[in-house]
Image (tube, grey):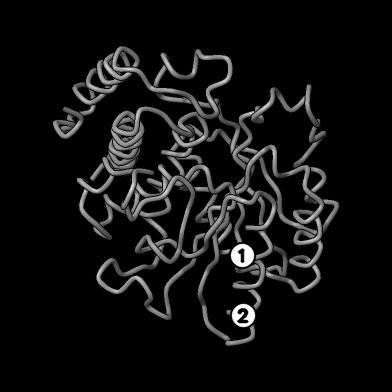
Amino acid sequence: MNLELELKKSALKIRGAIVAAIAAKGGGHIGGSLDLAELFAVLYDEYMRVDPLNPQWHERDYLVCSKGHAGPALYAALALKGFFPYEMLRTLNQEGSMLPGHCDRIKVPGVDATTGSLGQGLSIAAGLALAAKLSKTDQRVFCITGDGESAEGQIWEAVQFSAHYKLDNLIVFLDWNKMQIDGSNDEVMSLGDVKEKYKAFGWNSCLIDGSSVTQINETVGNAIEYKNGKPTMIILDTIKGYGVSCVSSIKNNHCIGFSQNLYLQAKGELETQAEQLGVNLKWLD
């Protein structure tokens, strides 16, 4: 089996599901969802120890999507994993749906934390990781953070907490697409050298290509093997809206309306990629 190819196929399926879900609603948080497709493909295909038939399995690994507006990407990954039917994705953020716009652990099978109030998710993840340490389990905790929330003070309190308690079962990702809701990081609040910041706080820290399933896979595998008493930050160098050029070319694609014309453009791009990879995306219709 060609692992890289299979992971690329999974990422494309996730990306297609995100587009279909947001198009059905007529808009939503698409930019910062699309650029996480590769990460979710790697995590759920290769690393997350979960049971779709028993979402509350007490020995499972945990994933906290602190940037809760990326819920559409997480939902797509969970649907592909079998936590609920694909068809449910088309009800995203609609009245009566079990899939709200932001992650909700009460409503959505497989979601471990309700998020959306930015800056809080890393604290939740750190608490889960400490609990696993105290319980002497081998559970891993993964957390996904964003650019904008990295300016929140609570993030850095959690960073300090995690280093102090030597949470080497905690692996955090920063979706570093260099954009926030109101503009670029440099315009709104520069993060500076974020890799060195995390190192200064006592973390393992690295910067990789967030669109490369190979780099993500190798880096996560290495992070899991680290037992040096340090949590790990993996900074994903991404492009907001990556994988669908008609979306990524929109200057501010954080949360946008999704017209039928835009959907048809996105659908055409995805179908071309699907043909190249040998993936069936017929449910985009």
In the picture as drawn, the residue positioned furthest to the bottom comes out as 135
Q: Is residue 283 above or below residue 269?
A: below
- Distance in Å between CA atoms under marks 1 and 2: 10 Å
Type of the residue with mark 1? Ala
Residue 197 lies left or right of residue 89; in this view the side is right
**x then y, percent, for residue 104:** 46, 58
**x then y, percent, for residue 32:** 52, 34
**x then y, percent, for residue 61:** 46, 69
Q: Give the numbered dot on residue 125.
A: 1
Q: Is residue 115 above or below residue 135?
A: above
In the picture as drawn, the residue positioned furthest to the front comes out as 95
Q: Residues within 10 Å of mark 2 (few under 14, many from 20)?
A: few
Residue 91 lies left or right of residue 27; in this view the side is left
Type of the residue with mark 2? Ala
Q: Is residue 236 visible?
A: yes
Residue 55 lies left or right of residue 106; in this view the side is left
In the image shown, does 11 or 91 lie closer to the viewer? Answer: 91
Secondary structure under badge 2? helix
Q: Give the numbered dot on residue 64.
A: none
Q: Quadrant of the N terminus?
A: top left
Check disc 2 and report the residue beneath it: 131
Question: Reading the chain from its start, which is encountered first: label 1 or label 2?
Answer: 1
Quadrant of residue 16 in the image? top left
Q: Is residue 5 visible?
A: no
Residue drawn where x is 23% and y is 28% of the image = 277
Q: Residues within 10 Å of mark 1 (few under 14, many from 20)?
A: many
Secondary structure under badge 1? helix
